[in-house]
Image: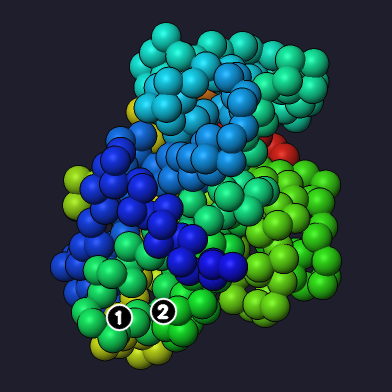
């Protein structure tokens, strides 16, 4: 019986029919910033701009090799898995049906159609992923179509592990990274890479990155069993999974929960903007997770180390850019929102504006509701160039007798009015 590593190597060789190995690039900017040798495994440079094509390809390849006579394949996805699935359907000349939520952005629908061409049919069903996933399972059962899961299958894991196979080939002979940072959603990628390196006996310290609002692996490891989260923040849509996959967790269950870093969504946005503005690298939120982890380590702890960060995807919808920039500014302390009790008298606005400094700018000014004849509640958003400027403003507001509340970090109020 062949080993896991041997099967991954076979899958990697077969994958060359679709695209060459993605680059393992040393990033000078990140290396200088953190005092380490930071290498980026650029999965955003596959034909579908994510690693998901690997698992889908391996699943199809093995199903066909096993003599599976299914002429129809099906998946449920609103993102990268759908695009990888569609590309592979066209490659093998197999018909496929992709179930997507009705709320899926048109850009993702169009890209899936582009990759699949005449071989793929898209069906929109339900407002949420769970709805369309159930519909896809029902379709598979009634039609006899072959279900291609996004992460919870041994052949998918084996395909995603080809990322690790390429990293091992691309590192200097006999060398390993001191640390390897892996993003986690359903767990297929991290399960495959860790198992591959274990099998080839190449030591590396593995660190995992999950969105803070969807930390299913960290929660499960802390509990010693798979735990389904009650609620998930869907902002990091490529990794917002309520429950780690059963098969991935079998591979990952012995890692300590401390190895998983919960990445704040707003901080992640700052990393996305940083990589876009400085390096010209377009990353989706899930694709920036591994890079963002570097912020958690004191410089002295990683100085001189070789660190590999797997950049899992670059399918970013630029219609989301204003929201990403907004979140980044709030995380960096350069933008705040206040509700002021504003006097209804001539000159009040001028008095308020006179308190602002030369680097302070009004980004939003909106009357919410007049609470009394002489006063009104006003939402004011202020941007500045240095977060310390807000300390100065707070002192000026107090000295001038303005009544206000900072709602920047109040998720309940901010969610309603911002």
Q: Is residue 228 found left or right of 51 in the rendered image? A: right
Seen in the picture, residue 377 relative to 256 is either above or below; the reply is above
Mark 2 neighbour density, 10 Å: few (under 14) some (14–19) many (20 or more): some
Which label number is shown at residue 237? none
Asked which colour scheme the image uses, the reply is rainbow
Q: Nearer the viewer, residue 357 or 172?
A: 172
Q: Quadrant of residue 34?
A: bottom left
In this figure, which residue is indicated by the disc labeled 2? 179
Mark 1 and mark 2: span between their CA atoms? 7 Å
Tag 1, which secondary structure?
strand
Residue 119 left/right relative to 30: right
Residue plotted at (61% across, 26% down):
69
Does the image show residue 135? Answer: no
221 is higher (above) or lower (below) than 10? below
For label 1, the residue is 306
1 or 2: tag closer to the N-terminus: 2
Check the picture and name the quadrant holding the N terminus. bottom right
Residue 369 % position (x, y): 68, 20
Residue pictured at 23% horizontal, 82% vertical? 173
Q: Residue extending furthest left?
A: 28
Q: Position of residue 147 (x, y in %)?
A: 67, 31
Residue situated in front as seen by the camera: 410 or 373: 410
Task: Looking at the picture, tell me which residue is in the foreground, 230 or 157.
Answer: 157
Q: Are marks 1 and 2 in contact (CB under 8 Å)?
A: yes
Assess disc 1: are there few (<14), some (14-19) or many (≥20) residues with their C-alpha within 10 Å of its C-alpha. some
What residue is shown at x 66% (from left), y 28% (from top)? 146
User: Circle 2 sits in a helix, a strand or a loop, which is it?
Assistant: strand
Left or right: 141, with 132 as reference point: right
């Amino acid at each position: 019986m062949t080993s896991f590593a041997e099967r991954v190597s076979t899958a990697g060789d077969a994958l060359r029919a679709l695209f060459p190995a993605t680059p393992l690039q040393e990033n000078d900017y990140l290396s200088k910033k953190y005092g380490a040798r930071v290498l980026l495994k650029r999965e955003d440079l596959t034909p579908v701009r994510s690693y998901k094509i690997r698992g889908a390809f391996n699943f199809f390849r093995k199903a066909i090799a096993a003599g599976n006579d299914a002429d129809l394949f099906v998946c449920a996805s609103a993102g990268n898995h759908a695009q990888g699935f569609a590309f592979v359907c066209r490659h093998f000349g197999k018909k496929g049906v992709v179930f997507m939520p009705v709320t899926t952005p048109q850009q993702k629908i169009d890209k899936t159609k582009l990759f699949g061409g005449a071989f793929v049919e898209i069906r929109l069903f339900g407002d949420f992923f769970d709805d369309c996933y159930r519909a896809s399972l029902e379709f598979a059962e009634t039609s006899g179509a072959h279900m291609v899961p996004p992460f919870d299958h041994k052949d998918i894991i084996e395909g995603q592990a080809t990322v690790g196979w390429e990293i091992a080939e691309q590192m200097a002979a006999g060398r390993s990274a001191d640390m390897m940072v892996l993003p986690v959603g359903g767990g297929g990628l991290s399960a495959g890479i860790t198992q591959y390196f274990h099998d080839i006996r190449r030591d590396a310290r593995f660190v995992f990155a999950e969105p803070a609002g969807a930390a299913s692996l960290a929660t499960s490891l802390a509990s010693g069993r798979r735990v389904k989260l009650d609620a998930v923040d869907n902002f990091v849509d490529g990794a917002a999974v309520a429950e780690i996959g059963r098969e991935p967790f079998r591979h990952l269950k012995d890692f300590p929960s401390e190895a998983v870093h919960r990445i704040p969504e707003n901080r992640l946005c700052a990393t996305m903007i940083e990589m876009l503005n400085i390096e010209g690298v377009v990353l989706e939120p899930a694709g920036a997770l591994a890079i963002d982890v570097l912020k958690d380590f004191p410089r002295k702890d990683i100085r001189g180390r070789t660190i590999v960060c797997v950049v899992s995807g670059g399918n970013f919808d630029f219609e989301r850019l204003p929201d990403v920039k907004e979140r980044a500014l709030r995380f960096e302390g350069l933008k705040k929102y206040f509700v002021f009790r504003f006097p209804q008298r001539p000159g009040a606005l001028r008095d308020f504006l006179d308190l602002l400094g030369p680097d302070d700018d009004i980004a939003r000014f909106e009357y919410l509701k007049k609470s009394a004849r002489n006063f009104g509640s006003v939402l004011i958003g202020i941007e500045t160039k240095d977060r310390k400027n807000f300390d100065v403003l707070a002192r000026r507001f107090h000295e001038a007798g303005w009544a206000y509340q900072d709602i920047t970090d109040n998720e309940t109020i901010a969610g309603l009015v911002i």
